[in-house]
């Protein structure tokens, strides 16, 4: 749906194109930063791999020489008698790094982290070296133990080095030390949604230094000046958030390219699922492929087995903590220790969720009087700050989310999981829009992607729903581990809790 501002913007861009201001023959004025950064990244990782491969072969020959049961020709003795072998390291590096580069493992982050492919490339290069050594260079002899040790050390060093390098880069980006300066381009509502998703998923990896508003007619009048201004502010890439609304994509692409900027299309206005897609080219036509939904069949039983083992362990080892909290609740205020509330679970079925009581006994009756203080924008969720119904001990329990830990009982009973969309009260579900019920297709959880991405700081339920759907569509056991570990960090840091 386009509003009047969008229609005016499209007319401005169309008239701009027809007037000849945007010319696809316009020469490239600035060097693309993405190219220079790409070459710098390529050289850095190639130098790292070259050093590690060289050290692996050096160590392999040292260890091979010390093996007392080796009856074949000693490689170092032969190396001393045959000086031209000193140049054998060069073809080793050329073959090994060449195969890694041919597999595309020096590219973007996702390709660099394909460790199984890297394992296969290193093994293939070692096999090729064996063939070349014994078939084409009969004067150069290396023992079988040297080759085996070199293969083993190369795998250990290169894989470990790649993993450590990626971990270091991720840590630096989270601290804001290594950021990618970008600009957003689109309509205000689309840019706002993109900015929110970047903040939740990438933390400090991207630094948004400019927002190009397509609803402003001045943007089109000063189009090239805007692009040059963005370039000289250190921006390397423009995220287009309203691509479907641009009537002349080729003109837009070429003008951004000529300014020396990379272009990335964010499909905010294309309404595609939040699942991580696979881009495939059929002929010359790009297609977006989505995998079948997760959390069914074998995935469900794998997740269920993990939940049973983990929840039983938590219940056993945390039993002293349960007892201590129960005593404090009894001493603080009259009422039961546990609070069991009817909530909506899998497939919309009603479940009783266990919690430590954190409010006074008549909290449900008092809620109607407090509805006007609700801080959520759409009113779906009920959240207020400084809730007068919360007891003293309850405030402490909520601050560290200790009131939620009895829900491992729900996990053992089979109506909840450790990780999943939070089960909401009927009062909240009654205010759902139709598409919100999609979150009930999986078992609810004690914690989830929504909770570790802002908790109570997210005041728009639509944003929380998108995070829940992103979890459902991209589930993996590794993602569950990641969310559980991040939950500990969020709870200890008291982020967004009240």
Image (spheres, rainbow, N blue to C red):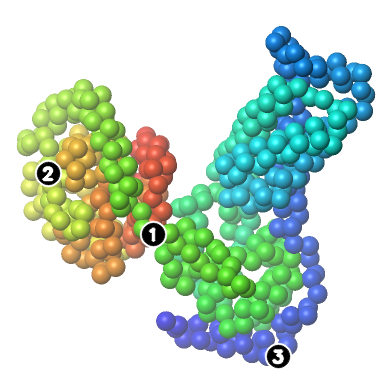
Regarding residue 401, the answer to whether it shows in the image is: no
Q: Quadrant of residue 227?
A: bottom right
**Foreground mark, 3 or 1?**
1
Q: For numbered disc 3, what is the local secondary structure?
A: loop
Where's residue 219, x and y in %?
62, 77
The foreground one among 20 and 43 is 43
* Residue at the extreme top: 68
Q: Residues within 10 Å of mark 1 (few under 14, many from 20)?
A: few
For residue 136, side relative to residue 17 (left or right): right
For marks 3 and 2, the one nearer the N-term is 3
Q: CA distance from mark 3 to mark 1?
A: 47 Å
Q: What residue is at 38 percent from the left and 50 percent from the top?
A: 475
Q: CA distance from mark 3 to mark 2?
A: 68 Å
Q: To which residue does mark 1 refer?
A: 292
Q: To which residue does mark 2 refer?
A: 340
For marks 3 and 1, the one nearer the N-term is 3
The foreground one among 3 and 141 is 141
Q: To which residue does mark 3 refer?
A: 19
From this view, report whether residue 443 is shown above or below residue 408.
below
From this view, report whether residue 126 is shown above or below residue 445.
above
Q: What residue is at 59 percent from the left and 73 percent from the top?
A: 285
């Amino acid at each position: 749906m386009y509003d009047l501002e969008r229609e005016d913007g499209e007319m401005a861009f169309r008239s701009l194109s027809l007037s000849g201001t945007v010319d696809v023959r316009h020469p490239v004025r600035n060097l693309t930063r993405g190219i220079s950064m790409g070459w710098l990244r390529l050289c850095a990782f190639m130098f790292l791999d070259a050093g590690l491969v060289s050290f692996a072969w050096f160590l392999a020959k040292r260890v091979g020489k010390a093996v007392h049961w080796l009856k074949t020709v000693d490689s170092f003795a032969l190396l001393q008698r045959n000086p031209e072998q000193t140049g054998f390291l060069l073809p080793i590096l050329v073959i090994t790094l060449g195969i890694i580069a041919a597999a595309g493992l020096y590219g973007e982050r996702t390709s660099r982290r394909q460790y199984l492919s890297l394992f296969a490339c290193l093994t293939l290069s070692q096999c090729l070296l064996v063939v070349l050594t014994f078939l084409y260079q009969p004067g150069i002899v290396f023992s079988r133990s040297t080759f085996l040790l070199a293969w083993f050390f190369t795998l250990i060093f290169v894989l470990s080095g790649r993993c450590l390098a990626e971990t270091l880069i991720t840590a630096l980006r989270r601290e804001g030390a290594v950021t990618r300066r970008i600009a957003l381009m689109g309509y205000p509502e689309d840019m706002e949604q993109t900015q929110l998703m970047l903040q939740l998923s990438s933390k400090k990896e991207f630094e948004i230094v400019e927002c190009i508003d397509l609803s402003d007619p001045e943007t089109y009048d000063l189009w090239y000046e805007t692009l040059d201004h963005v370039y000289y502010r250190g921006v390397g890439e423009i995220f287009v958030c309203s691509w479907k609304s641009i009537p002349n994509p080729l003109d837009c692409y070429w003008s951004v390219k000529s300014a020396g900027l990379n272009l990335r299309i964010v499909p905010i206005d294309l309404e595609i699922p939040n699942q991580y897609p696979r881009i495939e080219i059929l002929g010359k036509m790009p297609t977006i492929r989505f995998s079948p939904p997760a959390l069914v069949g074998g995935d469900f039983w794998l997740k269920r087995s993990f939940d049973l083992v983990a929840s039983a362990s938590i219940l056993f080892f945390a039993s002293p903590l349960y007892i201590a909290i129960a005593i404090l609740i009894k001493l603080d205020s009259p009422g039961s220790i546990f609070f069991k509330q009817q909530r909506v679970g899998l497939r919309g079925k009603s479940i009783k969720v266990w919690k430590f009581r954190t409010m006074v006994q008549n909290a449900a009756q008092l809620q109607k009087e407090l509805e006007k203080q609700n801080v959520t924008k759409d009113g779906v969720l009920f959240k207020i700050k400084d809730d007068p119904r919360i007891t003293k001990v309850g405030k402490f329990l909520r601050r560290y989310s200790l009131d939620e830990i009895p829900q491992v009982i729900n996990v053992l009973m089979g109506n909840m999981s450790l990780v999943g969309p939070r089960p909401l009260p009927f009062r909240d579900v009654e205010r759902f829009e139709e598409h919100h019920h999609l979150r009930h297709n999986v078992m609810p959880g004690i914690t989830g992607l929504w909770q570790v991405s802002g908790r109570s700081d997210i005041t728009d339920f639509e944003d929380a729903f998108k995070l829940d759907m992103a979890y459902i569509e991209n589930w993996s056991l590794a993602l569950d581990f990641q969310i559980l570990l991040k939950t500990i960090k969020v709870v200890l840091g008291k982020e967004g809790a009240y």
